[in-house]
């Protein structure tokens, strides 16, 4: 079975990989990357568990999640008669930072499904699997499910905040740095000219810390930091992510 998670940016892309590996025992395997679906100039990675494949795909921002969904539906539409390339489960993850974001996003998804003549009977709601059907280019009927995960963007629920809190707990010296970075971000832009939303503030805190901890963009060092985080505990803070255990 093929599964895919669409996320906004590179930070979510990397953090979701570690989360799925540590919390739900998905495995990174270099030998299964050739067929990984991805958008131009974006990142994508296949993970495996038993005979199941999970693709985690960054789309390059919230405004491009629709483009990512179209790429997935194109893959399903063009799949061979045995449906070996088709995705059975599609998860779309974004955050809700402003009033109206959730309903607007549901409308975007519904519109794209209509373009591909996808049928479904349930009403799209947040954090609820929707069973869908479509006919591919070979005239073969396909069934798949879509899960919209529109996360209420409360600072304590963000993956970036969880990671910084985990590091602060384990590393007293780094806690001082993180606290200083957080104080800087909270006060550096009083007119909110650049940090105009909670999402931007949270991500700025995350990247400010890592720009000090790994100023040379040392990927191996960042990997080691992420590997040491108890990712399975994230589910306790963000219950919406429990749905990912169903993949």
Image (cartoon, grey):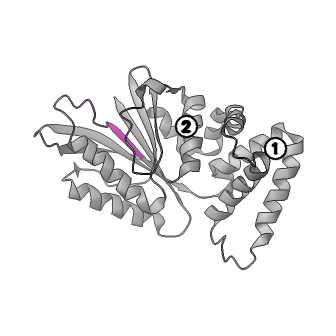
Q: Is residue 35 left or right of residue 200?
A: left
Q: Is residue 230 left or right of residue 39?
A: right
Disc 2 residue crowd, few under 14, some 14–19, many 20+, Cα 10 Å: many
Q: Is residue 206 above or below residue 237?
A: below
**Quadrant for the C terminus in the image:** top left
Q: Nearer the viewer, residue 127 or 6?
A: 6
**Quadrant for the N terminus in the image:** top left
Q: Circle 1 is placed at which residue position?
A: 168
Magenta-drawn segment: 83-91
Q: Residue at x 48, y 45 (%)?
A: 43
Mark 2 vs mark 1: give the one in front: 2
Whole-Å distance between the Cαs marked 2 and 1?
Answer: 22 Å
Q: Which mark is residue 72?
A: none
The total of numbered circles placed on residues is 2
Examine the image and state in which quarter residue 228 appears. Answer: top right
**Residue 161 appears at what percent x and percent y?**
70, 50
Q: Circle 2 is placed at which residue position?
A: 17
Q: From the image, give the main secondary structure of the stretch colored magenta.
A: loop
Q: Are marks 2 and 1 in contact (CB under 8 Å)?
A: no
Q: Residue at x 67, y 32 (%)?
A: 227
Q: Is residue 194 above or below residue 175?
A: below
């Amino acid at each position: 079975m093929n599964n895919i998670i669409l996320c906004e940016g590179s930070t979510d892309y990397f953090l979701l990989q570690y989360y799925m590996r540590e919390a739900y025992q998905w495995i990174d395997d270099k030998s299964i990357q050739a067929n990984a679906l991805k958008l131009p100039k974006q990142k994508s990675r296949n993970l495996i568990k038993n005979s199941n494949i999970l693709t985690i795909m960054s789309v390059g921002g919230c405004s491009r999640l629709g483009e990512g969904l179209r790429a997935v539906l194109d893959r399903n539409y063009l799949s061979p008669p045995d449906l070996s390339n088709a995705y059975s489960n599609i998860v779309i993850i974004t955050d809700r930072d402003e009033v109206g974001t959730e309903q607007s996003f549901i409308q975007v998804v519904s519109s794209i499904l209509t373009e591909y003549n996808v049928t479904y009977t349930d009403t799209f709601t947040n954090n609820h699997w929707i069973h869908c059907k479509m006919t591919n280019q070979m005239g073969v009927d396909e069934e798949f499910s879509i899960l919209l995960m529109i996360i209420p963007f409360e600072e304590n629920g963000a993956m970036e905040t969880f990671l910084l809190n985990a590091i602060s707990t384990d590393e007293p010296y780094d806690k001082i740095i993180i606290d200083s970075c957080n104080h800087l971000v909270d006060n550096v832009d009083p007119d909110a000219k650049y940090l105009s939303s909670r999402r931007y503030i949270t991500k700025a805190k995350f990247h400010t810390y890592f720009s000090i901890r790994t100023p040379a963009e040392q990927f191996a060092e960042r990997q080691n930091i992420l590997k040491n985080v108890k990712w399975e505990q994230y589910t306790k803070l963000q219950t919406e992510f429990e749905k990912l255990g169903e993949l």
